[in-house]
Image: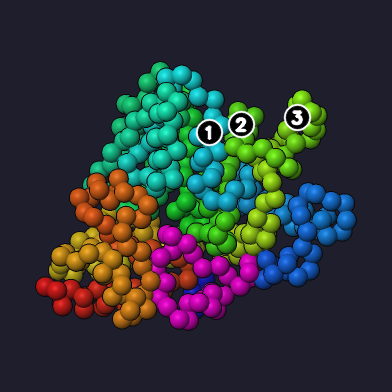
Amino acid sequence: MYDVLTVREDFPLLKNVIYLDNAATTQTPVQAVSAMLDYFYKYAANHGRGAHRLARETTDHYEDARDELASFFNMDVEKTVFTKNATEGINVVSRGFPWKQGGHVIVTLVEHHSNLLPWMRLKESGVELTVIKPGKDGIIDPEDIRSSINDRTQLIAVNHVSNVFGSIQDIGKIISLARMEGVKVLVDGSQSAGNMPIDIKVCDPDFFVCPGHKGLLGPQGTGLLYIKEPDSIEPLLLGGGMVSSVTPDSFRMEPSPAKFEAGTPNIPGVIGLGRAVEYVKDIGVHNIEKHELSLARKTALLLSEIHGVEVYGPQNRAGVVSFNVVGMNAHDVAMILDQTRNICVRSGYHCAMPSVDHLGVKGTVRASFALYNTEEEVEALIRTVSDIVSLVL
């Protein structure tokens, strides 16, 4: 394991608050911020658009970051596409996939809006949608997905970890079932990338997306899209940097990944993301996973022991704990935690309204964990929630 207190020194903001909103965004270590500053102060230029020394150095650092991400997930470099977030990656697939008239997509009720709305919009193009309901703990039965596959099903889209329940889906089983039926699978790794080990060549999805600003500790405005067969997808955007030749009548696109990265990318963000992933790799994803699971499961257990608190999700959860204080609005609870103890949590629907509606509530309070959180912070949360309950019950 690693020394959490030493790690916390790399995240200065943690000196001021108890930050438990990591499912929304994590803090970025000073090493990654320094890498971005180096870009601005030492060699700033555009990527892939010049022969001068600054352009060459910029391009080298940008592509080094791609190599770092590809190595981290064990994926081929040419199939590793940078995006501005997971949402963009999902939309690239939904808009560029070779849909057939009357095609069929399967998703689940526990998806973030980003992995639900793009598939809903396909109804306008004649593509049908089936939404699979989970159990009360937010876990999807792979057999429910299998039984929904028909001869028109082209794709299954599923998250790895729910941002509401903290439930971990059996993506290995889902992908295996899909392979037997000749159906493609998109995995949303927004809550698992950097939080648990992921080997793309082992789990073998057709598409994998994740943001840079969560478990990977990178800056906002960065993300990753893996495409197993890049030639099967049309790019979402056309423009500079993704073509090899243009005439007044036609153009020829570059191969992947360039063809999916039209326009000037978030160069400093990608460079920072590459350094952040090095940081995660140095600590060890297995160590991070063990730490976060321990904190989340302890939090869920201690909250469930407080009379007047409802906890949602399975016992064997990832680093996400959603709960409510009976009789109180989730936003009010979050505000009290912030104003009285400097505890930052998320409240509301978490951009996953169908998931929360499935619980029969109008929002939840969500505590979510990262590699730098401590047991002392968990205990502070529990004490404060207990104090809140004592005032209302």
Image coordinates of residue 359 in percent, x first then y, are: 23, 50
Which of 72 and 49 lies nearest the eye of the viewer?
49
How packed is label 1: few (under 14 Cα within 10 Å), some, or many (20 or more)?
Answer: some
Label drawn at residue 95:
1
Q: Amino acid at mark 3?
A: Phe
Dot 1 falls on a residue whose secondary structure is helix
Residue at the spot x=40%, y=76% of the render? 18
Residue 26, x across and y down, in percent: 49, 64
In which image quadrant can residue 245 be found?
A: top right
Left or right: 381 in relation to 245: left
Disc 3 + disc 1, Cβ < 8 Å: no
Q: Residue at x 14, y 74 (%)?
A: 392
Question: Mark 3 or mark 2, which is nearer the start of the sequence?
Answer: 2
In the rendered image, residue 243 lying in the magenta stretch gets the answer no
Local SS, label 2? loop
Instruction: From the image, tell me which residue sits under label 3.
Output: 251
The secondary element bearing badge 3 is classed as strand
Extreme-front residue of the structure = 248
The answer to the question of whether label 1 and label 2 lie on touching residues, with beta carbons closer than 8 A, is yes
| Farthest left residue in view | 393
**What label sits on residue 234 in the rendered view?**
2
Give the magenta-colored segment's residue range: 6-33
Instruction: Report crowding for label 3: few under 14, some 14 to 19, many 20 or more residues within 10 A (C-alpha).
Output: few
Q: Amino acid at mark 2?
A: Glu
> Residue 69 at what x, y percent from top left?
63, 52
Disc 2/disc 3 C-alpha distance (Å): 14 Å
